[in-house]
Amino acid sequence: MSDHRVELSRPVSDEVRKTTCYMCACRCGIDVHLKDGKIRYIEGNRDHPVNRGVLCAKGSSGIMQHYAPARLDSPLLRTGPRGSGEFRKISWDEALTLATGWLGEVRDRDPKKLAFFTGRDQSQSLTSFWAQQFGTPNYAAHGGFCSVNMAAAGIMTIGGAFWEFGAPDWERTKLFVMFGVAEDHDSNPLKMGISKLKKRGARFVSVNPVRTGYSALADNWIGVRPGTDGLLILALVHELLKARRIDVDYLVRYSNAPWLVIDAPGTADHGLFARDAEGKPLVFETVTERVVPAGTKGARPSLSGRTPLPDGRAVAPSFQLLAEEYLDSRHAPEAVADRVGIDAATIRGLAEEIGRVAFDEAIEIEQPWTDVYGERHQTFVGRPVSFHAMRGISAHSNGFQTARALHMLQVLIGAIDCPGGFRFEPPYPKPLHAHPRPHGKSEHFGSNQPLAGPHLGFPLGPEDLLVDAEGKPTRIDKAFSWDAPISAHGLMHMVIANAHAGDPYPVDVLFLYMANMAWNSSMNTAGVIRMLEDKDEATGEYRIPKIIYSDAYSSEMVAYADLVLPDTTYLERHDCISLLDRPISEPDSVNDAIRWPVVEPDRDVRAFQSVLIDLGARLRLPGFSDSRGQPLYADYADYIVRHERRPGIGPLAGFRGLEADRTGRGAANPDQLNRYIENGSFFSAHIPPEAQFFKHANTAYQDFAVRMGFFDQPQPVTFQLYSEELQKFRLSAQGLREPAAPEAYRERIMSAFTPLPSWYEPFEEAGVDKSAFPYHAITQRPMAMYHSWGSMNAWLRQIHTRNPLYVPGAICDAHGLKDGDWVWLSSHHGRIKVEIARSETVNRDTMWTWNAIGKRGGAWALDPASPEATRGFLMNHLIHELLPPKGDGMRWSNSDPVTGQAAWYDLRVNIERAEPDVTSQPHFEPQKRGTREVADELRYGQEWSR
Amino acid sequence: MHPALSIIAFTTASGLGYGLAAVLGLGLLDPTSVATKIAHFAALALISAGLLSSTLHLGNPQRAWRALSQWRSSWLSREGVMAILTFIPLCIAAYGAIFQSRYLPIAGLLGTLGAAVTVYCTSMIYASLRSVQAWHTPLTPACYLLFAGAGGSLLGLFFAASGGGNVLVLSVLSVVLLVAAWVLKWLWRQHMLSQVPLSTPESATGLGFIGKVKLFERPHSNDNYLTSEMGFRVARKHAAKLARLSVLLGGVVPVAAVAPLPLSGAVNPAFAVLLAIVAVLSHAVGVLTERWLFFAEARHAVMNYYGH
Amino acid sequence: MTSLPSQPTPKKLGLVIDLDVCVGCHACVVSCKEWNTGGYGAALSDQDPYGPDVSGTFLNRIHSFEVTPEGGEVVGEAGAARLIHFPKSCLHCEDAPCVTVCPTGASYKRTDDGIVLVDEDMCIGCGLCAWACPYGAREMDLAAGVMKKCTLCIDRIYNETIPEVDRVPSCVRTCPTNARHFGDLADPRSAVSIMVAERGGMDLMPEQGTKPVNKYLPPRPRKPLAANSAPAAEDTRGATGFFAWVDDMLDRI
Ligand SMILES: Nc1nc2c(c(=O)[nH]1)N[C@H]1C(S)=C(S)[C@@H](COP(=O)(O)OP(=O)(O)OC[C@H]3O[C@@H](n4cnc5c(=O)[nH]c(N)nc54)[C@H](O)[C@@H]3O)O[C@H]1N2
Ligand SMILES: Nc1nc2c(c(=O)[nH]1)N[C@H]1C(S)=C(S)[C@@H](COP(=O)(O)OP(=O)(O)OC[C@H]3O[C@@H](n4cnc5c(=O)[nH]c(N)nc54)[C@H](O)[C@@H]3O)O[C@H]1N2
Ligand code: SF4
Ligand code: SF4
Ligand code: SF4
Ligand code: SF4
Ligand code: SF4
Ligand SMILES: [Mo]
């Protein structure tokens, strides 16, 4: 009967090339199947430590990313006005000569007039090095508008952060609590992990105003009101303290809980740690009843009790202050339930469950190990409760302290880097002092010289701020100034506004890489567009005179560049996922990876990193050219192999040494990239079993870290529940410490820099009339899109061609709204007209939409009539980079006052019914639709069909 | 369901054609008259036009011949086979009438039978689909058959009035069939409107044990093949209006035209022809409307996944 | 042949989809498209790919539903609505109406493993099978004019040119949460059959009489947190105040 023929064993492809995905920062390993020189299929690399063979929707649509008609195909010089998208194609020679001219002139005259900022950059170790050699103080990547609260709070509290630098122990955790995560950078491992723990029957709790994505899988959804997680976490701490569910032994060993804090109000030492002559913090020893340096062998430090020091000053263990603070009934579940929007019983139930699992279900792994104090342990004791958090707590103006509170909670129950808890990923943990101080004071730079040190780092006190004698910022983004003293990642979201305002000074060249600043990565997008278009009345020149931009696709930002340096796609270039950068290690292994050109570019484009290295040589930057001005590196591939940051330490840790037998430290190996390619484009070194937990205080791990070259000597971490660094800023705010904080900043520093984690009302909420703007509005990342760069992808864009505003049923009912209605959504700053959809799976005061689906007409090679441009919308129009003016006329940046993290999710709104429409508002004139031909039908792979 | 023009035109035209063929096959018209010869021709033309139009919506019409192969299981295939088989007696009967002015009873009766079976097959294409609950009832073939019969007798009446035969018989037949068709259609529609949905979002997802299921997000924001093909929606208000219109045009007007026709025929034959034309055209428009609604109002089970 | 196999097929290959862990990421959707465009049969085309009316052929799609309990299971915190992501592709039904309606014999169910396929060389693109399928598992490719549907990646699962571990459907291989499982549902000892038995795997629209081979695992029941919440008792073991307790603990270490 069956005459149907099916060819079952057709070879998939001619060849498989293994490289690394770049459609988000997860950096999964991929197997690229090539057939007739074209991409036939992309699948996950089963051996890869990050994704173990799986791929997300973006990764699986690499073909359409790679062949998108929106790809740029040649360097461009602007011919029309900014924003029109009208360009002339120029040669690389012309482009590089022009860029070298612009940049060389700035470097010679006043290097700070170059602002070099990079967005979704995965080569920050190169771009920052380049910027340092150039000598401008104005460099940062996107962390400031992204998740610096998370990173800074983590590093300052536990020496590492959730943010890519650690992960829950998916194999062993029994209770997993996740705060404010829609997708995250580590998205495939998170998906794999959540599913693994659910299959084991572990409990998964999600704290999130919206119940979609991961939260949809949670056993318990805690639909908090945005910006109140701090209250919730401190209530959990209150309950755990009250129930005495805390790991006292752990606190004494690994945290600064016993360190003595000076109680001498009105003096410059108040609230700082009492230290011995060598600067070692002191503890009170209970057996001898003496004050001894922390870490003294055999000492039994006290966690409570006020004592006088020999010099008469009163001191108390920091834990005493902590317990007094959080046992206060202000922090009781009943006291916060209303504000958080969650009933007290649920909060108590969660605290109870955390305590129960941590202590009654503790686990032990038989594995002898030695701690850094020399004590031998027979087992690793695990408190199988793990946490994870991302921008839901981070993207608020109180996010830094909220993230600190969460880390404090983890330390209190002894759940950091233990079996079943949150586990560090090498090279983390790393103590705060092992990070550099920021460089960018006026004495750090000058004409034709490199910056004196790295741009970014952590100030340990107000003395490390990048301000001049008057307290004015020296950086264009005002990072590390009184505006945002610990802005460890810079404030990319302020660059255009500040440069436009000439505050603190104007710039000559704005050099951007991979950041769609004219659209979705800016707050107040329409305002930013105006700033980019704005001309100086006197000279007729643009206020920001020259913009150089590197993108691979015709994004909204491209239309605002004067000179466009077209990049390759991720399949056409070398890249390096380095331990010097944002690493891809896992808790059990140290990993790094490369990309290499698995297909050759068919256009006149060049890899940006190689272009940057070329520019470095043309500008004769040290580090890029030798003493005779000859280029040091042929291209990025050459740099990856031969560049050394410290002797023997280069961008890649694997296959070092001439025999390719050295790991971490070793001479450059000319064959290194081939060895990576043979190995599937990654390298992985296992952490020895006795070094896998308690890395912050584990001798074997510390030795391993030194061997690997993370540090030159062991760098154990003591968890900083109480932050002395923050207290130093308060002392400045009280005028007790030099430099003293300017008057206008004092109040906010006092309230935001509490040395113990605290909660305060998000600034926008505190600043607007709550009855005029009664609701919250937030965005979430769709899993199938990466910011703005999914819409040129024919397969991905179909999933989200437009985005409705999801409005809770209760608000719909109150305003008589139903699916498909149009509304005006307004904030203190502006209003947008959008289409709504009703939803029940959301906090009752919160509306939300998918992030960055709305597009400008003509961008991304889309027809301007596409739904992305007509019905899609950006929430960004409602979010201002500045807070509403206060009585004093001063407008603060809409950011966390400690780190400068952009407070995207503080937004308060009002909703009103609008006339039905077909176009969302605001709507922009379309830009020119690129230069390539755009097909009206795709039949990809038809030539292979049979 | 998407009311595809080609399919509506096909079922309407072939229904009329097969109806007329059946009337001819029963020998109700005078084989010697010119009108009857034209009627045979018209029946074949309507059937062929219908069949041709049905191939218009095929993705690969050049392979349409393959559709004859699965008569053992597929109503669509049976319809194709029957259509072709039925052509044989119909052509023989037409040959007899046109060239020999003869009524050939065996060919005629076989033609009538074939026409009925073909229309039945057509209707069973729809009635056999459990996925479209409105269609999945014996009332569907009954309606199709009666509409074909009514349309055929109206056409027959027209040819009779034009000199082809006994107006009275066909008038009576027309009225009876028209009334029967619309009564049944009315029942059919009541049946559809009062149906408890066989499948629901709850049964479609299996999630009813948790609670009420409502679509949150469809797979792709734009329409896709399924939503354009199966997701057609007509507002209830409009549907009711159109349904009334279809009865009016397809039933009331033709009956009103046909009832006085035998009498008027005696007075003024031309007027009788005019009445027959009015009846036929009005009926055709009414049936087109009915067919449009037949598709537009039918809800496909897959829409349980698409929130409507 | 259009007629269904007269005997139950000795193997019933199909998918088991775990609604408890699907996060709705669409990875399986895109991976399926990528494997199949350029694989079995005509490419899966996209119309107006960069314009307003973009739409393409997909063999697998993800819906999301809000489910609001009304006296049913109390989920999460009492009464709260739940969001459930819902992947859907061909269920390879045992009584597949899509097969029996096909006039050409292009649609068929394989007698040895039960996979339902379209022989595109025979398909006239009449669309009737798509009407017959209650699940919306068939989509006409508008460029090729032939019916497309999930092939269960027949050109992977038997493909001797790829490593054995990879002989699973593309969607199964890529799913980051391992929500998709492939196997023989006729064999009660297969991993998928055991999963179905243990988790109460269910049929979609059983009332349609299609007897789907694919099964869906319902979301696991949830345990509310508030149930835990006896008020946090002050633990007064052996000490009076909090700090006394702390110091007592220290002594025991
Ligand atoms: N697919 C995809 N993956 C991505 C990206 C992408 O665009 N697409 N972007 C990457 C980038 S740059 C980043 S920074 C990461 C971000 O990764 P996530 O942090 O996961 O991203 P967001 O979408 O900002 O998610 C924030 C979540 O917090 C919730 N939320 C908002 N306010 C609050 C609050 O006050 N409290 C709590 N508890 N929750 C709140 C929101 O509902 C949302 O679910 O994702 C990365 N990964
Ligand atoms: N309302 C709201 N706004 C937000 C957020 C939010 O949660 N809500 N999140 C914020 C966050 S956390 C972030 S990180 C930002 C992200 O915002 P952006 O940094 O602007 O991210 P993308 O939209 O991905 O834009 C990056 C640019 O890189 C380009 N690109 C893609 N591939 C390549 C390549 O290979 N080479 C080069 N040279 N360029 C390439 C893209 O074409 C695009 O123009 O958005 C922020 N904006
Ligand atoms: S998560 Fe997806 S997009 Fe990101 S690297 Fe992995 S496969 Fe690529
Ligand atoms: S890949 Fe897996 S988790 Fe993602 S949508 Fe498909 S079945 Fe669900
Ligand atoms: S799911 Fe639909 S297409 Fe698949 S076998 Fe069942 S009826 Fe046929
Ligand atoms: S579309 Fe093709 S497979 Fe479907 S019923 Fe018609 S001929 Fe058969
Ligand atoms: S089995 Fe293959 S064809 Fe079917 S949905 Fe999965 S990937 Fe697509
Ligand atoms: Mo970000």
Image (tube, coloured by chain):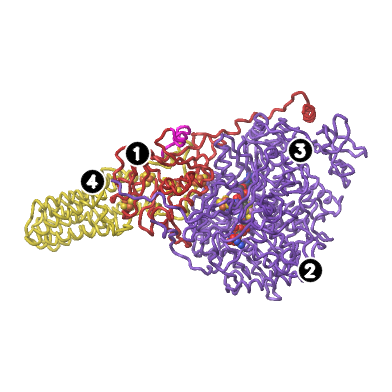
- Numbered tag placed on residue C9 in the rendering: 1
Q: In this view, does C183 lie to the left or right of A589?
A: left
Is the CB atom of the residue marked by disc 4 within 8 angstroms of ligand 6's nearest atom? Answer: no
Please, what is the three-letter code of the amino acid marked with disc 3?
Tyr
Identify the residue at horizontal 70%, vertical 45% (top origin). Answer: A403
Mark closer to the observer (1, 3): 1
Alpha carbons under labels 4 and 3: distance apart: 84 Å
Please, what is the three-letter code of the amino acid marked with disc 1?
Thr
Indicate the chain coloured purple by its letter: A
Indicate the chain coloured red by its letter: C
- Numbered tag placed on residue A447 in the rendering: 2
- Closest to the observer, B57 or A166: A166
Q: Is residue A361 above or below residue B143?
A: above
Q: Quick one: SS at disc 2? A: loop
Q: Are marks 1 and 3 in contact (CB under 8 Å)?
A: no
Q: Is residue B66 left or right of residue A786?
A: left
Query: From which residue to which does the magenta span run?
Result: C189-203
Q: Are marks 4 and 1 in contact (CB under 8 Å)?
A: no
- Closest to the observer, A497 or A302: A302
- Numbered tag placed on residue A254 in the rendering: 3
> Residue reaching furthest right?
A311
Q: Do the residues labelled 4 and 3 touch (CB within 8 Å)?
A: no
Quadrant of image for the C terminus of chain A = bottom left
- Indicate the position of residue A435 as horizontal and vertical percent values: 76, 51
